[in-house]
Image: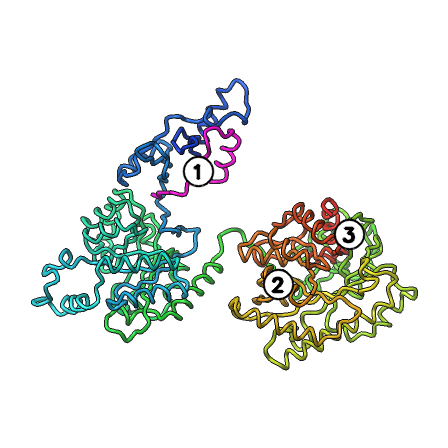
C-alpha cells in the first residue's frame, strides 16, 4: 500500500470540465481522479467506469460540462488516522484508490492498493525505479553526534539516497537494562559493552536527523523496541527498519505497522519458514513494506551469501526486495541489483580500524561512491525485455564493418535482377545480405554501376529526390568532395557544407575543383574532421602540450584549406559571408574516456580551448564551435563530453570570448535531456550566439542524427524561437547517413522542414 500525499496528479476541481478530468486520468495512469471544491473538500470521484456510465445515460454528450456531473458523489473514504488494516479492508470491488480525509472533510492523502511499490520520503522503491542506496551508519558514529553528522555529509557526497541509524531504549531491549552486562555470554556482553559506549539517545539522534534534512538526504532508522518505534514515529521518519534479529518479533512488527510507516525488513539469521510467517504477519497489517536478503555474519563469507535467493524472496513476499550486505567490497551488491534488488544497504565508515564489528564490513566514502556509480551503470546496462533494437553506435559499426548487396555489373533501368547481378561486399551502407532473396527477380527503377549499393527503395517505390525548396533562411547540404554532383543534380542549394576527412586535407584543392572551371554557383561552409591520422582526436582542451599543439596545427590546416576553396564558388553561404567569409564548424574537444569531469573543472578547460583558438589564424573565415552531446560517438565508440554540452556554460564561453556557435539541435537536445533541462530553455541560451545551424532530431541522451520528426524535438516551437533569435542564420539537415541512396535522408528531412522553416 502507498499513502500518496502529492495530490496534484490525482485531483481536479469539481467545476473543471469533464475533458480536463479525462486528461488527468490518462496522465496519472491510475484511471481515476478525485474531485474537490475550492477549499479542498472531497466532493466525488471519477473513474473510467463512472465516465462510461455517465456517457451511456446522458441525453446529449459534451465534455465541457462540470466533472462533478459525471462523478460518483459518494466516494469511499476513510479518516487520515485509519490503520493500514482498516485501509486494506476498504480496497476491493475494483477500488484500488481510497480517499483519506481530515476531520473537516478535506482530502489530504490517497491510499493506493499496490504491494509492489513503496515510498521512502522522496524515493520510490519499485521495479521500474532506480535502486535506492542506503548508507548504513548504524552506530559507526561511535556515540559522537559530530561524527554522525560528518558521516551524513560524506554519505551525501558519495551519492547515497538514504542514511540509516539505529535507536534502542536499553531498558526495553535488554533484560538487565542499562545496568551492565554481567552474567551474559561473551557475545551479548561484547555487544552490550559497545552500546554502553556508543549508543545515542533519541534526542541526540533527532539532532542528527535534523542535519539530514538540511543536507537534503532522507533518513531511516532501525527501531529495536516499541519505545523507540513511538519516538521515531512521533519525529516523523519516512521509514522504519527491522533488523534481522527482530524479523521473528511479530509483536514489534505489528506495533510498527500500526503507525502506517513503511517498513523495510532484513531476513538474516532466519529460516524460510520464519520468513513466510513474517510475510503473512506484515501482509495482514496492510502496511507498505519491502524485504532484504541478508547474511548476518561480519564479514559474510562469499560462499554463504546465496544471492540467488533474491529471486525466491521476491516470489515469497510479492513485494519489493533488496540486499543488505555484510561482505567485503561492493561487487556483491552490484550483482544483487542485476538480480532484481531495488534496495541496497551497506555499512559506511571513515575508518575500518575503529572498534566494532560493523566497521570491519563497512565501505569507506570513496568505495561507497564507486559502488553508487557501478550500480547506476548496471541499471543502465540492464535495459528492458523489449525486442532488440540496434543502438546508434552499433549502426555506425554496422556501416563500417558489415556487408551490403551491391551491383555486380552495370545494370540499366528496367532489367530483371538475377543471381549474377548481385554481389555481397563491404561496407554496410546498403541493403543487408539477408535481403538477397527479396532482391532477386525485382525490376530495376534506376541505373546502377558495378559496385553501387542496393537500397531498401530498390525493393519498392523509387527513392525521393531533391527539388526546389522554399525556406526563409539559407539552406545547404552536407557533402564530401566526391558526391557534389550526385547531391546537386536535382536541386541547387544555397550552399554546400564540406565534411572533411583528414585525408581530404591532403588533396590539392585546385585539382578537386578543376572540373568546375567557372566555379560552383553557390556558397559553401566546411566541417573540420574530429579524427585525424593515428587515432588522433582534435582536442583544444587537452592538458597534454603535444596533443594541444597538434590540435592547433590540424585546425589551422582546416582553416587554410577553407580559405583556398573560396575562389571556386561564385556566391557566399549567406549575406554575412560576403564580408566575413565562410563558416567553419569544429568540435573543439573536452572529451574524457571514463567519466565526466566535475563542473568546477570545466572553466579551466574552456580557457585552454580559448588559448588554443587564439593561436589559430582564422582571418577571412568564421570559425564556429559546435554544440556537443554528453555522450559523443566516435568510430562506433562512446566518450564523455564536458564542454559545449551545458547550454549555460556554452553561452558563457561564446560571450566571454566573442566566439560564435554552430547550434547542432540534435546534440543540444540530447544535452538538455541529460541535464533535465527544457530544450526551449537551451535554445533561448544558444540561439543568440549561433552563426550556423545543424537541424536534425534526437532521442534520449545519445540517440543523435535521427530523421526530422522521428525524435523528440518540437519543431514548431524550435522554428519560432530560431526565427526570433537567429533570423537568417544558415542551416543544413544533418541526418545520419542522409547522403546514402543519392541523399534520400536529406530529401525527406527538407520536405518535413519546409512546413516549419
Callout 3: SS: loop
Q: Is residue 235 above or below residue 179?
A: above
Q: Residue furthest front?
A: 656
Q: Residue furthest top?
A: 59
Q: In this view of the protein, which residue sits in the foreground, 288 or 494?
A: 494
| Residue at which label 2 appears | 652
| Residue at which label 3 appears | 473
| Residue at which label 1 appears | 10
Is residue 22 rendered magenta in the image? yes
Residue range (magenta): 1-29
Residue under the point 39% across and 63% down = 156
Q: Position of residue 627 (x, y in %)?
A: 65, 62
In front: label 2 or label 3: 2
- Mark 1 → mark 3, Cα distance in angstroms: 46 Å
Label 2 neighbour load within 10 Å: few <14, some 14-19, many 20+: some
- Mark 1 → mark 2, Cα distance in angstroms: 41 Å
**Figure disc tally:** 3
Left or right of 114 in this view: 378: right
Is residue 416 rendered magenta in the image? no
Label 3 neighbour load within 10 Å: few <14, some 14-19, many 20+: some
Confirm or deny contact between disc 2 and disc 3 (CB under 8 A).
no
Amino acid at each position: 500500500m502507498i499513502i500518496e500525499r502529492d495530490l496534484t496528479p490525482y485531483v481536479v476541481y469539481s467545476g473543471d470540465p469533464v475533458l480536463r478530468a479525462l486528461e488527468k486520468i490518462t496522465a496519472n495512469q491510475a484511471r481515476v481522479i478525485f474531485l474537490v471544491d475550492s477549499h479542498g473538500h472531497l466532493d466525488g470521484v471519477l473513474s473510467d467506469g463512472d465516465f462510461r456510465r455517465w456517457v451511456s445515460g446522458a441525453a446529449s454528450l459534451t465534455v465541457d460540462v462540470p466533472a462533478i456531473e459525471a462523478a460518483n458523489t459518494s466516494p469511499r473514504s476513510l479518516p487520515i488516522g485509519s490503520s493500514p488494516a482498516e485501509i486494506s479492508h476498504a480496497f476491493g470491488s475494483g477500488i484500488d484508490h481510497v480517499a483519506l480525509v481530515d476531520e473537516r472533510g478535506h482530502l489530504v492523502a490517497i491510499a493506493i492498493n499496490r504491494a509492489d511499490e513503496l515510498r521512502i520520503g522522496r524515493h520510490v522503491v519499485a521495479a521500474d525505479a532506480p535502486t535506492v542506496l542506503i548508507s548504513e551508519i548504524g552506530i559507526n558514529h561511535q556515540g559522537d553526534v559530530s561524527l554522525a553528522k560528518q558521516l551524513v555529509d560524506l554519505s551525501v557526497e558519495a551519492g547515497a539516497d538514504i542514511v540509516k541509524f539505529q535507536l534502542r531504549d536499553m531498558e526495553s531491549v535488554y533484560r538487565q537494562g542499562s545496568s551492565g552486562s554481567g552474567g551474559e555470554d561473551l557475545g551479548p556482553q561484547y555487544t552490550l559493552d559497545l552500546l554502553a559506549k556508543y549508543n545515542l539517545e533519541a534526542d541526540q539522534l533527532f539532532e542528527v536527523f535534523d542535519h539530514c534534512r538540511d543536507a537534503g538526504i532522507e533518513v531511516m532508522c532501525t527501531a529495536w523496541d516499541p519505545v523507540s518505534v513511538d519516538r521515531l514515529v512521533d519525529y516523523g521518519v519516512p521509514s522504519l527498519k527491522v533488523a534481522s534479529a527482530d524479523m521473528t518479533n511479530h509483536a514489534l512488527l505489528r506495533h510498527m505497522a500500526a503507525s502506517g510507516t513503511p517498513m523495510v525488513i532484513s531476513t538474516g539469521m532466519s529460516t524460510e519458514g520464519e520468513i513466510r510467517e513474517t510475510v503473512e504477519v506484515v501482509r495482514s497489517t496492510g502496511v507498505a513494506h519491502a524485504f532484504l536478503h541478508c547474511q548476518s555474519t561480519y564479514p559474510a563469507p562469499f560462499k554463504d551469501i546465496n544471492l540467488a535467493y533474491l529471486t525466491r524472496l521476491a516470489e515469497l513476499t510479492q513485494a519489493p526486495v533488496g540486499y543488505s550486505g555484510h561482505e567485503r567490497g561492493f561487487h556483491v551488491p552490484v550483482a544483487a541489483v542485476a538480480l532484481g534488488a531495488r534496495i541496497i544497504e551497506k555499512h559506511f565508515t571513515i575508518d575500518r580500524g575503529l572498534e566494532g564489528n560493523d566497521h570491519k564490513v563497512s565501505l569507506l566514502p570513496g568505495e561507497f561512491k564507486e559502488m553508487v556509480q557501478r550500480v547506476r551503470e548496471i541499471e543502465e546496462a540492464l535495459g528492458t525485455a523489449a525486442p532488440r533494437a540496434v543502438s546508434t553506435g552499433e549502426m555506425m559499426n554496422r556501416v563500417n564493418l558489415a556487408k551490403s548487396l551491391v551491383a555486380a555489373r552495370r545494370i540499366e533501368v528496367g532489367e530483371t535482377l538475377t543471381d549474377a547481378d548481385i554481389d555481397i561486399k563491404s561496407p554496410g551502407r546498403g541493403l543487408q545480405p539477408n535481403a538477397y532473396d527479396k532482391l532477386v527477380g525485382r525490376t530495376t527503377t534506376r541505373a546502377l554501376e558495378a559496385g553501387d549499393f542496393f537500397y531498401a527503395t530498390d525493393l519498392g517505390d523509387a527513392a525521393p529526390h531533391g527539388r526546389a525548396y522554399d525556406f526563409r533562411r539559407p539552406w545547404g547540404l552536407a557533402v564530401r568532395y566526391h558526391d557534389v554532383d550526385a547531391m546537386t543534380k536535382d536541386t541547387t542549394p544555397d550552399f554546400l557544407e564540406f565534411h572533411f576527412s583528414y585525408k581530404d586535407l591532403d588533396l590539392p584543392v585546385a585539382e578537386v575543383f578543376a572540373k568546375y572551371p567557372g566555379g560552383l554557383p553557390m556558397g559553401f561552409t566546411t566541417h573540420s574532421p574530429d579524427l585525424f591520422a593515428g587515432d588522433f582526436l582534435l582536442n583544444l582542451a587537452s592538458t597534454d602540450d603535444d596533443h594541444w599543439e597538434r590540435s592547433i596545427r590540424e585546425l589551422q590546416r582546416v582553416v587554410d584549406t577553407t580559405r583556398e576553396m573560396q575562389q571556386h564558388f561564385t556566391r557566399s553561404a549567406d549575406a554575412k559571408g560576403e564580408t566575413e567569409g565562410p563558416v567553419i564548424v569544429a568540435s573543439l574537444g573536452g572529451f574524457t574516456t571514463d567519466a565526466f569531469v566535475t563542473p568546477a573543472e570545466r572553466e579551466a578547460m574552456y580557457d585552454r580551448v580559448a588559448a588554443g583558438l587564439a593561436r589559430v589564424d582564422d582571418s577571412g573565415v568564421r570559425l564556429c564551435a559546435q554544440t556537443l552531446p554528453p555522450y559523443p560517438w566516435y568510430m562506433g565508440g562512446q566518450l564523455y563530453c564536458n564542454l559545449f554540452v551545458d547550454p549555460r556554460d556554452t553561452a558563457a564561453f561564446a560571450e566571454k570570448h566573442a566566439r560564435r556557435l554552430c547550434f547542432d539541435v540534435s546534440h543540444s537536445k540530447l544535452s538538455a535531456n541529460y541535464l533535465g533541462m527544457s530544450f526551449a530553455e537551451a535554445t533561448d541560451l544558444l540561439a543568440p550566439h549561433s552563426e550556423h545551424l545543424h537541424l536534425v532530431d534526437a532521442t534520449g541522451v545519445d540517440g543523435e542524427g535521427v530523421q526530422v520528426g522521428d525524435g523528440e524535438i518540437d519543431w514548431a516551437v524550435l522554428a519560432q524561437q530560431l526565427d526570433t533569435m537567429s533570423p537568417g542564420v544558415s542551416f543544413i539537415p544533418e541526418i545520419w547517413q542522409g547522403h546514402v541512396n543519392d541523399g534520400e535522408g536529406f530529401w525527406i528531412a527538407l520536405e518535413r522542414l519546409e512546413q516549419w522553416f
